[in-house]
Image: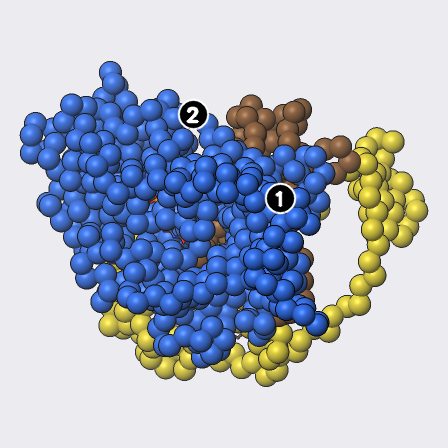
Amino acid sequence: MNIPSKFDTIVVGAGPAGCASAYLLAKAGFKVLVLERGRGVGSKELWGGKAYAQPLRDVWPELDKEAPIHRWVSKERFSLVWGERALTIEYKLGRKVAFTTYLTELVNWMARKAENAGALIVDEVRVEEIVVKDGKVLGVKSGDDIVYADAVIDAEGVNRLLLEKLGLVDKLSPDHVALGVKEVLSLDPKLIEERFMLNRNEGLAWFVAGDITLGLPGGGFIYTMRDSISIGLVLPIGPAARAAEKGLLKEHVSSLVEAFRLHPYFRSFWREADVIEYGGRMTIEAGLKLMPRKLYMNGLLVVGDAAGFLVNTGYTIRGVDTAVISGKLAAEALIDAFNNGGPTEENLKSYEEKVKKSYIYSELKNHSGIGDVMSDPFFFQKIPQVAVKAASKLFEADYEEPKLIRSFLNAAKEENISLLKTIYKLGRVAGKL
Amino acid sequence: MRIVVGIKWVPNTQAVRIDPETGTLIRKGVPSIVNPHDLPAIEAALRLRDTVGGEVIAFAMAPPPAVKGLELALGMGVDRAILITDRVFAGADTWATSYVLGNAIVKIEREYGRVDLAVFGQETIDSSTAHIPGQVASWLNWPYAYYVRDIQVSGDSKIRIVRELEEYVEEYEVELPAVLGIAMRALKPRPVSLYNKLRAKLDKNVIITWSNSDLKLDPRCVGLKGSPTIVAKTIDMPEVPRKKEVYKPRDPRDGAKWIISKIVEDEKLRELLVKKLWGE
Amino acid sequence: MSSQTSRLKTMKLEELLQRSVWDVDEERHIEILKQEGLRVNALILLCPMGCYSIAGDKLIMSYEGCVECGTCRVLSRSDQIRWEHPKSGRGIQYRYM
Ligand SMILES: Cc1cc2nc3c(=O)[nH]c(=O)nc-3n(C[C@H](O)[C@H](O)[C@H](O)COP(=O)(O)OP(=O)(O)OC[C@H]3O[C@@H](n4cnc5c(N)ncnc54)[C@H](O)[C@@H]3O)c2cc1C
Ligand SMILES: Cc1cc2nc3c(=O)[nH]c(=O)nc-3n(C[C@H](O)[C@H](O)[C@H](O)COP(=O)(O)OP(=O)(O)OC[C@H]3O[C@@H](n4cnc5c(N)ncnc54)[C@H](O)[C@@H]3O)c2cc1C
Ligand code: SF4
């Protein structure tokens, strides 16, 4: 067998982070092996549906022309729902900022880019251990087989089995992660464009808060794809599990998603649609709290979700662009290290410095308030409820029309919320959202 | 020992749905896989090689995407894989398929030396005819055994095989070369290993593709043209009306007893069964 | 194979599961080691694929429909649930996610 005894770098996981670093390293001429546990690339991937383009263009300037982009997001919608009632705000964008696609497809494209640049991608292989000796990472192990490399990039995603084994992270706490449950609904592109009032190749991203989560923290998302619509709920696991144990949550999560699909306000958008896939995946709620004790060690770099690099703003989840950028920074740091005597701990320090200087880190800090919001029923329950109630007072009057501010004040009063408390609470988290 | 193992690339039937409006099968988006019943056949071949030495060659008559399936076989440890692919092979029934496979074995012998054993799965999940192994044996004029659960080498050019049938176990001695159909779930297939999968990706010579210009078979004997099977009619099986009963036992054993009481009418037999299962 | 239509009526979890594709391994990758102290209701209601169910007093885990999300892992300790990824690329095969 002519197996190369050693690679320059082994990347664990062909997600966005792994593919980005493998691509850049291979392009720079290094011998890269990517190991992926799934069959083919992308078969284990599930997300909401929207990627921010500019960070991806930093790695692949040809993105707009080549990537499997379904629709460029031209409209953002935000809804607060309570019962049958809904209050919706829509914003029409002025430029191409983000696009929708299936993550399964997008990572496939990224992997092909890496492969064409010379990286070797081997799927159907589950890495079981990162091999360390005397504080230095030597390679990876699967079954009885060990493959050696000068450096390993851990891009294994949120379920960090390998990092846990290494002792770089503790086991995840339910309060730091959320569960995403999703359905994909097939629908004729013409109907999608008609219903959402979109031009061809234009898409819509929609965030929904309110009682669709049955009083649990979290929210819903809707994304228009080329010929389908992705809908789903994201529920922080800690509070949901506590509610289940206390008997406050009585239904299985799938029935919450089904109720969302069949909600009288939303269902008219996809009346004819058929569910073509159903699934779930975990995501990060509190990115900063998930950062490993060390982002690097002698011969190892941690990127993407595995490093906690996901910005959850409460209304949007940005994990793919941050994964790609962290993959890029890791590749750059590693190339520097290779050119300066090798990937020693000392030489890899620049990775952490690069991360701390990048938008990933500042965004993570800026949005660290999401935890406060998500754990406070005031935000995920009271605010939607009061807003919808106020709107109902405004728009569901049979005789006289109340004034705008009166409607709000009355609604707030009925729900026992004082204006002062609202201002105080909003002020406390505003800086962190 | 040189062992060849036949692999069929089949749609994952678990994912096939019926269009509620047209009643036809929805094939879009259905990924293909290695016929699951072929995995025990691969395992049987590998175990034999691991004890007596030699090589295992996997082969499939299939369209090019089936390379992915051959990679899985290589990942499990098969030494070499041959994809037999050509437009003229398309639309084959079992007759034409086995004709190509039989001739492929003849060519394998020409290229690599004597083939001692050809192993196949019991049947496929998408057609389940279980014709192929027997037909291949007929084309080659080799002995054939099926429902095989165990193979042991017993001296020169002979194997002992165990067939497990519903009520008894049979043991045979079979002269080589021979064709075997391995029983479903007879052996647990080994997982893909890192080294084997690496080799499958790196070694350019490990997957070989043959078209009909390599096999040189008469186009009238292969593919649709060479397929005498005519599907005269397909009938949708009427749905049997079902009665629903719900029984919620605290102890799963009570549930089992309840099910037995529902499906076994004969009281004596029922008692015997319960006694045999739980000694009550 | 299934012939149910989703459209505008609620689909049961069993129907939803038929919309996704698995290549199920012969070997289970998740196993309950010790039921004592497990957050039973949370596992039953939150596993998106309904892999956890109760029979009598016993919590049962059916690994076949698992999508490897990790929720049951974060809700338990490693001496309660053994949790691994499936081998050989098997398990869930997402297509449109
Ligand atoms: C419900 C939900 C909605 C989301 N919505 C969005 C969104 O709209 N926009 C956005 O930008 N982000 C979104 N995200 C986040 C985004 O999906 C992730 O942040 C991103 O995929 C992280 O990329 P990664 O490369 O770090 O890890 P992953 O994408 O998780 O990739 C890790 C890869 O490693 C493989 N792997 C793991 N362990 C091993 C092992 N031991 N051996 C071999 N291979 C292994 C996995 O199979 C996988 O392919 C969402 C996430 C969820 C769950
Ligand atoms: C009545 C009828 C009509 C058909 N008509 C058509 C048709 O018009 N067009 C069409 O495309 N198909 C048709 N088929 C399907 C086709 O005959 C079979 O798929 C194919 O010949 C293999 O048979 P099988 O799947 O039943 O295999 P089985 O005999 O059940 O398979 C047993 C074993 O043989 C091996 N094997 C099977 N196929 C291959 C292969 N291709 N390469 C290597 N090893 C293999 C595997 O080890 C497998 O486990 C028809 C089938 C029937 C029953
Ligand atoms: S990993 Fe997710 S899908 Fe699998 S059993 Fe656990 S909770 Fe269910």
Q: Amino acid at mark 2?
A: Asp
Please state if A393 lies on the left or on the right of B75 as rendered: right
Residue occupying the point 60% across, 31% down: C32
| Quarter of the figure that contains the C terminus of chain A | top left
Which corner quadrant holds the N terminus of chain A?
Answer: top left
Along the line of sight, which residue is nearer the eye, C12 or B250? Answer: C12
Q: Amino acid at mark 1?
A: Ile
Give the structural element (helix, strand or loop) at label 1.
Answer: loop
Q: Which lettered chain is shown in blue?
A: A
Of mark 2 and mark 1, the one earlier in the sequence is: 2
The x, y position of residue B272, in whole percent, is 86, 40
Does residue B255 appear in the picture of this structure?
yes
Mark yes or no: residue B31 visible: no
Q: Chain of mark 2?
A: A
Q: Residue B202 at what x, y percent from top left?
A: 22, 47
Q: Colour of chain B?
A: yellow
Q: Which mark is residue A170?
A: 2
Mark 2 surroundings: few (<14), some (14-19) or many (≥20) residues within 10 A: some
Chain C image colour: brown
Tell me the element at label 2.
loop
In the drawing, does residue B118 fall left or right of residue A152? right
Front label number (2 vs 1): 1
